[in-house]
Amino acid sequence: MPTVQPVTIVDVARRAGVSAGTVSNVLTGKRPVAEATRVRILRAIEELGYQPNLLARSLVNRSSNTLGVVTSGLEYYGPSRTLVGIEAQANELGYSLLLDLLHRPDVDDVAAILDDLTARRVDGIIWAVHEVGGNRHWIAPERLRALPPIVFLTMKSRPGTSILSTDNRTGALLATQHLIDLGRRKIALVAGPQDWWEARERLAGWQAALEGAALDVSSRMIVYGDWMPSSGEQALRRLLEAQPDIDGVFASNDQMALGVLRACHFLHRRVPDDIAVVGFDNMPEAEFLWPSLTSVRQRLTELGRGAVQTLHSAIEARGQGSALAPGVQLLTPELVVRESTIGRND
Amino acid sequence: MPTVQPVTIVDVARRAGVSAGTVSNVLTGKRPVAEATRVRILRAIEELGYQPNLLARSLVNRSSNTLGVVTSGLEYYGPSRTLVGIEAQANELGYSLLLDLLHRPDVDDVAAILDDLTARRVDGIIWAVHEVGGNRHWIAPERLRALPPIVFLTMKSRPGTSILSTDNRTGALLATQHLIDLGRRKIALVAGPQDWWEARERLAGWQAALEGAALDVSSRMIVYGDWMPSSGEQALRRLLEAQPDIDGVFASNDQMALGVLRACHFLHRRVPDDIAVVGFDNMPEAEFLWPSLTSVRQRLTELGRGAVQTLHSAIEARGQGSALAPGVQLLTPELVVRESTIGRND
DNA sequence: TTGTAGGCGTTATCAA
DNA sequence: TTGATAACGCCTACAA
């Protein structure tokens, strides 16, 4: 499986009538080279179509200028959007990206992936796998210590690690408070699966807002879904059977909110007149539903960019023998108000 | 920016009381090693926590076991889904993935990306950038010849290259024929931007179906959108102004179909009673709209997997001095019929 | 300013 | 079956 390109630095050197070391000097620019020989070498490079072998360079530099990204659920809006931010920032900082996907994040073998990443000598790792169930414990502490710098996305805080995440609790609180401010008094929650950290946080935000207004937060106001639209649809039907006078719903993601809207349509409940609906994620389609969906926007691109920046700092720090102080960075999301809560204004 | 791991193959050799070559032999399994020494070496590896340096290995093997993937629009369903397929198949074949994103596929500099990929000695490249405008000409033929094996996704056929793509024309034909079979006679097209190859193909499929039934394919039955929902919404309004008796619409993607449905809702046109609507892509939300959206499903995961398989064959072939015959593989999509054309059956 | 020599961590060849 | 030895392509002291 060899590549086509056999021209090396010595070929260039020979053609330019210099030594390989001198060619290396013009390539890296780390030492001065006489202008005359410099142009001669550059022309030789041009004529030969020479391209430095980054594998060899990485070997001696002990740094590959590569970041490993481990993520999952890339077919969904959130993770893929975050990856776009990661790639953009990595690119600007001169890193390439090695991508690994967990196809079943609750069971896949993490050790093999980490082994490959370290074997390829990545300079750092971004762990963008959603925290579901116990999978946060998969990276054993002793393994963590032997790893290059690593940044976690969308995870619960853990001592000694760097974490970036959306402030899910505040986002849910904003959404619910918005419903309260509109005068809604029976506000149900379509929750996500509670083995997801995000789902628990969003539930907590909903609860905090309602308790602040002395409204009902009992379990009959909650139905648990699985993030999918169909579960949102079923959830609303179940809620209305038990509580026909519900006038507001906070769905823990837009997909489930979609199901809620669909159920409202077929049950002839007007949105927002009878029931106001808020989602979470602000997926691209949210704006164009009928009614358009009020939702919580996460700063996903910033999340990705921030992860790379933090990782970059950690890498630089370790390169100088020090270490970056670990910590948690929470990005506050914002509410995007649309027709599903305030009606159509035209 | 060094990694933490200074333990090399010689450390292992020393500890096991053998030479480095022998350790290499048990690692690669390419030559027999006495069972006794084998276990001794394995224990040394275990105790030292040794991990082979794949950079060094790649250097001497002249093969990195890495594939470069260049794509764009990853925040959309299609490209990200395809990437999932690519990653899964690459993983199964033992490749790692180097990911590059074109953030503005119509202007971004391609040469730099290709340079980096070849400099990192990827074994092959998957080019999954949508063909828009003239960007297919960006890889100059002479550059192409100096590249490792490469497979193109979603591109127009070109001599001497391997291409995998959805059969967009047939997909559009299926969608339109479905409307015809339902008895619709004034079937409009919401087309995509015509500098996209996919958009032109889908237009051609729509046209072919209508011509087969001797229906109106004149330009007044076509409005051009930009793939976004808002353009679909506007498109339907414009169409209905000029042709109030339209009874069917084929939208060139689901996003625009979403806009069409939204427009129908606010214009009080019943779907499908007054107007039947078909989209293209079968995005996850399509099933849960109201009415749920009839759409054309592409086999995106298969597309990604097929690309890797084809690329793998090409790499193997070149490794043996031969070459894989280039060619075009078209994957036929299928129609998913839902409420937006046949109504609700409950 | 430039050349030489040694080494980065592997694998492969050739003897033993 | 195993051990030296020489690459792989590049960078970097140290000399010149």
Image: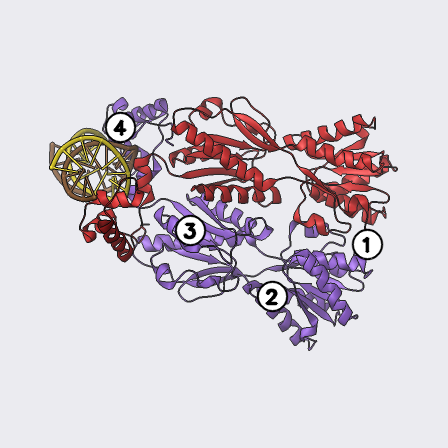
Chain colours: A red, B purple, C brown, D yellow
Is C13 situated above or below B268?
above
The residues bearing labels 2 and 3 have C-alpha atoms spaced at a distance of 30 Å
**Residue B236 in which image quadrant:** bottom right
Is B40 situated above or below B267?
above
Dot 3 alpha-carbon crowd within 10 angstroms: few under 14, some 14 to 19, many 20 or more: some
The residues bearing labels 4 and 1 have C-alpha atoms spaced at a distance of 76 Å
Q: Residue at x 43, y 55 (%)?
A: B110
Q: Is residue A73 visible?
A: no
Q: Report in which chain the residue with disc 1 lies.
A: A
Amino acid type at mark 2: Arg
Q: Residue at x 56, y 63 (%)?
A: B198
The residues bearing labels 4 and 3 have C-alpha atoms spaced at a distance of 36 Å
| Picture coordinates of residue A149, whole percent (x, y) | 45, 30
Residue at label 3? Answer: B113
Tag nearer the camera, 4 or 3: 3
Discs 4, 3 touching: Cβ within 8 Å = no
Residue at label 4? Answer: B10
**Residue A259 in which image quadrant:** top right
Which numbered circle lies on residue B202? 2
Residue at the bottom extreme, as displayed: B214
Discs 1, 2 touching: Cβ within 8 Å = no
Q: Is residue A210 visible?
A: yes
The residue tagged with tag 1: helix, strand or loop? loop
